Structure formats: C-alpha cells, structure tokens
Amino acid sequence: MPQEAPLNALDSAAFDRAVGAALRVLGTDPRGRVVIDGRSGSGKTTLARRIAELGGARLVSLDEFYEGWAGLAGATRTSARLVEAHARGSVGHYRRWDWERGEFADRDTAVDPAVPLVIEGCGALSPRAAEHASTTIWIDGDPDVRKRLALTRDGDAFAPYWDMWADQEDEHIRANDPAALAQLSFSAT
C-alpha cells in the first residue's frame, strides 16, 4: 500500500517554529509582510497557508504569476514590487498567469495593504523584497526528498520541467542569495 506523501518536507518542530516566528511578527505588525522563499518541494506553500490562516493574512503565491515554466525571474520582480507597495501602504497589482491558456489574465489582481501579506514561492525573496519585508524565511532541503515531494504533489505536469526549473532556482540563488537575506532558515529533511 503506497504511503501518502507528507504535506511538506519540514519536520513538525521546524514547521511550528517557523509558524510561531511569523505569527509573532504579524502580532506586532498588523500590516506585516512575510516573504517565504525556497526550492521546489521544500514546504513553502504549506507553511505560507498555515501562517496566513492563523495570522489573518492575504496569501499570494508566485504560482499565480509565474509566466509559465520559464517565469521565475519575472515573478521575482513582481514579488518585490508587491512587497514594496504593501510597505508603502499602496495597493499592489499583478496579473494572474493562466497555465492552461499560456497567457496572463486581462485584469489585474489587487493586494490590499491594510491586510497582512504572506507571499511565497521560488524567487520571492530578493534584496528589494527583503528591504520591505517584516520577516523573511528561506527553506531548502535534500534534493531527492524535495523532488519526490514536488512530483508527488504535481505529478506528470511538473516532471518534464524539473531540471529547467531547478536551473532557474540556481540562477535566482546566485543573483539574489535569498538564504543570506532570510531572517529564518530551515532545512527540510
């Protein structure tokens, strides 16, 4: 009988530490901005969902605006722009990517600066985003575990793009060094 894949690669103690730390920040900054970055399959989305749920925050995932499988760098710029606008108290905007049609939506999606923001995804954390974030989190882990979890989660849709995506992650890490920008770092097992 196959085992169900874990919700994320972080062990429960690390997951609880990350949630607690982010909630403490949001508790002192009700318009706070939590930026979560890390490699695919590391547990970013599960962590971000939990923080947003408990912290009453708006969750924005870079999956919403990657321009397809080659769109990590563009999403990094959009993430920084959204975090910066939120910090200024301005409404941020982005266009959703329609993965089935292969194009951006016709209308913008707004991000209300009066509500705490949790933004997550590979490429979310750059120097510009970190400058305006209330707290920053980096998650990495064993490549084989991450790949197994990501492909279990996304199946055949992601498998052909795994290497191409990993190359973009490597480029993002070289260009932005998100682990060094992170106030909290976790390694998934």
Image (spheres, rainbow, N blue to C red):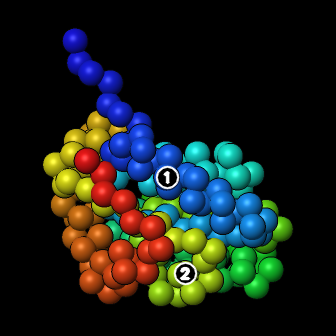
Kind of residue indicated by mark 1: Arg
Q: Which residue is located at x 57 percent, y 87 percent?
A: 131
Disc 2 is placed on an element classified as helix
Quadrant assignment, res 109: bottom right
Q: Residue 185 location in percent, x, y?
A: 39, 66
Choose between 24 and 93: the one closer to the eye.
Answer: 24
Residue 155 visible in the shown view: no
Outermost top residue: 1
Q: Which residue is located at x 32 percent, y 24 percent?
A: 4
Disc 1 is placed on an element classified as helix
User: Does residue 119 appear left or right of residue 8 in this picture?
Assistant: right
Q: Residue 47 location in percent, x, y?
A: 50, 50
Please determine whether, in this image, residue 29 is positioned above or below residue 42: below
Q: Return the residue at label 1.
A: 17
Please determine whether, in this image, residue 189 is positioned above or below residue 74: above
Please determine whether, in this image, residue 148 is positioned above or below residue 122: above
Q: Which residue is located at x 50 percent, y 55 percent?
A: 18
Q: Residue 8 location in percent, x, y?
A: 38, 42
On residue 174, the disc is none
User: Does residue 184 appear left or right of residue 106 in this picture?
Assistant: left
Q: Nearer the viewer, mark 1 or mark 2?
A: 1
Kind of residue indicated by mark 2: Ala
Q: Residues within 10 Å of mark 1 (few under 14, many from 20)?
A: few
Quadrant assignment, res 177: bottom left
- The reply to whether callout 1 and callout 2 are in contact (CB within 8 Å) is no
Q: Return the residue at label 2.
A: 129
